[in-house]
Amino acid sequence: AQKITQTQPGMFVQEKEAVTLDCTYDTSDPSYGLFWYKQPSSGEMIFLIYQGSYDQQNATEGRYSLNFQKARKSANLVISASQLGDSAMYFCAMREIRGGGADGLTFGKGTHLIIQP
Amino acid sequence: NAGVTQTPKFRVLKTGQSMTLLCAQDMNHEYMYWYRQDPGMGLRLIHYSVGEGTTAKGEVPDGYNVSRLKKQNFLLGLESAAPSQTSVYFCASRESSGRMGETQYFGPGTRLLVL
């Protein structure tokens, strides 16, 4: 079973609109972290935002916020006031902190976001 | 402060050849990782290290070996390259503890083509 599911392979959004990128996850570990990374066409992986499973509030970083719904196991990324430079692949990822398995991140397959002027 | 660097940026190999990918970080991070990214996929963990002199297997370790002789360096080796190892390889590192220690910082990637 996939641990990270991103159901939107691609999205087109008008510039200045808000964008929500979906991510659901599957874990039995009570302690975990959720991440979003951006990968522009140049290829590098850019960290955007982190949410810990015990965090009481949703994480925010500038125009990025993470809509964390623990009971639904969802961790959607919200980008406010989208810009042309937001066009990229976006990956949701998870680290199970006490899982006893391999350390490291488990990634979803990504969402290709295109911002249109 | 260069962050995480990877050498080389691009390489073409013939089937059966060997090579070593070098990852270096100047942030004094304890944890280091090697991932591979295939078309249409997210990254998958190959091997990782929780400190100097330690290594452990990730999700897709077959065909790869690693070494962490110095804290700042993490080497990924392919002893006998196969076309299935054509991929983009990313190295990452993070601190060992605390909230800030959760974030992994990635290198720019190495594109490897095995013919």
Image (spheres, grey):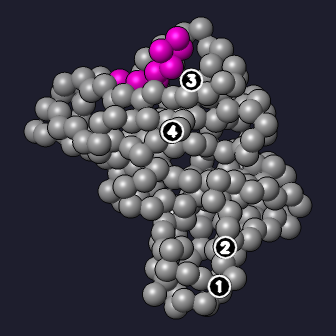
Residue A60 percent location from the top left of the image: 47, 20
- State the residue lying farthest toward the top: A56
Q: Chain of mark 4?
A: A
In three-dimensional space, the C-alpha distance between marks 1 and 4, rounded to whole angstroms, equals 30 Å
User: For the residue marked with disc 1, what is the amino acid?
Assistant: Ser
Q: Is residue A50 visible?
A: no
In three-dimensional space, the C-alpha distance between marks 1 and 3, rounded to whole angstroms, equals 40 Å
Give the residue at mark 4.
A2
Specify start and end residues of the magenta stretch as a single range: A70-78
Compared with residue B101, is residue B110 higher up or lower down, i.e. above or below? below
Where on the picture, by quarter, is residue B78?
bottom right
Give the residue at mark 1.
B80
N-terminal of the pair, mark 3 or mark 4, is 4
User: For the residue marked with disc 2, what is the amino acid?
Assistant: Gly
Q: Residue at x 67, y 73 (%)?
A: B63
Say which element carries label 4: loop
Residue A89 percent location from the top left of the image: 35, 46
Compared with residue A15, is residue B95 higher up or lower down, i.e. above or below? below
Give the residue at mark 2.
B63
Residue A31 percent location from the top left of the image: 70, 23
Asked if disc 2 and disc 1 are in contact, CB closer than 8 Å, the reply is yes
